[in-house]
Image (cartoon, rainbow, N blue to C red):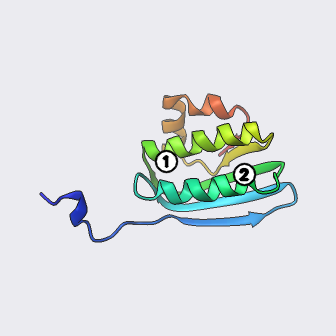
Amino acid sequence: MPLLADRKRVDKPEIDIVDTENGALVSLKGRVDIDSSPAVRDQLIALLHAPHPSTVSIDLSGVTHIDSSGVATLIEALKIARNCKTELRLQGLHDRLHRLFEATGILSLFNDGIRR
């Protein structure tokens, strides 16, 4: 059984940030897990602490896997966004992510800020 340190490859998510008319669109692709969520966190926090966009939308349609650290990253970003008076939205939730977010109660945290 290989140890975690023996893993040769860590899938890093693609993070694309585009300025929009109302704020910013963050598109994530790939895995958002314990190995990659720190990079996602750093990008989101930097964006939210920059001159505050009125809205930040996070497109999860390209996310192939998310674990608890990825979910925690989204919740932390939501808390920071609320403190900065920025609306944080999730979009592109495919069925698997939608069910996960519904089962864990995350859908209710984001209220109307979720689009499928």
Spatial distance from mark 1 to mark 2, Cα to Cα?
Answer: 17 Å
Out of 59 and 15, give the one closest to the viewer: 15
For the image, the number of numbered tags is 2
Instruction: Name the kind of residue labelled 2 in the image.
Output: Leu
In the figure, residue 106 lies in which quadrant? top right
In the figure, residue 18 lies in which quadrant? bottom right
Q: Is residue 36 left or right of residue 40?
A: left
Q: Which residue is denoted by mark 1 in the rendering? A: 70
At x 27%, y 71%, the residue is 8
Label 2: few (<14), some (14–19) or many (≥20) C-alpha neighbours in 10 Å: many
At x 77%, y 58%, the residue is 24
At x 58%, y 57%, the residue is 42
Secondary structure category for the residue under label 2: helix
Instruction: Pinpoint residue 34: horizontal percent, then vertical percent.
Output: 40, 52
- Foreground mark, 1 or 2, reads 2
Instruction: Name the kind of residue labelled 1 in the image.
Output: Gly
Answer above or below: position of 103 versus 72.
above
* Badge 1 vs badge 2, beta-carbon distance below 8 Å: no
Say if residue 95 shows up in the picture. Answer: no
Out of 103 and 53, give the one closest to the viewer: 53
Q: Residue furthest left?
A: 1
- Residue 48: give its label: 2
